[in-house]
Image (cartoon, helix red, strand yellow):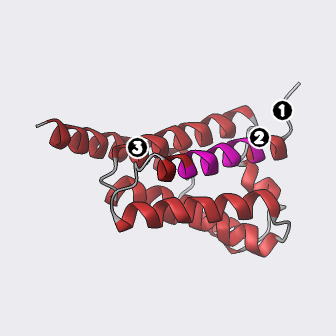
Amino acid sequence: MKIPENIFINVFFSLFMFIMILFHYLDLLITNVDYIFASSAIIISLLLIFVKNNTIIDIVHFLYCCVYLYSVALFSNNKYLILLNIIMIVNIIFSRYYYNCCILDNKQKHEGFFYNIDGYLKSLIPHWNWDYLLLLTILVSLINFSNVYTIKII
């Protein structure tokens, strides 16, 4: 028996939000950019957990997948945020294989601009798969993490 998709979403985004609050409480957020990433993560999590409106879910889905994940991978210098980003991307890839789909697409009932972009990309690139971009983002995050971690040690 599979875990219901909504429960999976609620649990992992609740944990994501809790960890961001914990980072704040433990003073692991150093720069203004760290605070922006953490605040964005909390807002995105709250919206994904509580909002039922497809348009809002579509926008938040885009913000999380195309803005937040890639921004942290590319621009964060906080090893804790980068490591959490890696964990969240692994979670996304796991859920995509566990459920055989993107569960946020299901939550937004396969409607909306972001969902349509995916269809458009698949029509242009026959083997289009977000998993490739997610794996690339993990790789970028790991490189960034090793650079940040190396700099902090020296």
Give above or below for 59 relative to 119. below
Q: Residue at x 79, y 68 (%)?
A: 111
Is the residue under label 1 in contact with that under label 2 (CB below 8 Å)?
A: yes
SS under mark 2: helix
Q: Which residue is mark 3?
A: 80
Is 38 left or right of 142, judged from the image as shown? right
Is 152 left or right of 32, judged from the image as shown? left
Residue 123 appears in the rendering = yes
CA separation in Å, label 2 and label 1:
7 Å
Is the residue under label 2 in contact with that under label 3 (CB below 8 Å)?
A: no
- Outermost residue, right side: 1
Residue type of the residue flagged with mark 2: Phe
Q: Which residue is mark 2?
A: 8
- In the image, 143 versus 120, the foreground residue is 143
- Look at the image and tell me in which quarter the C terminus lies: top left
Q: Which residues are magenta?
A: 10-21
Q: Label for residue 96?
A: none
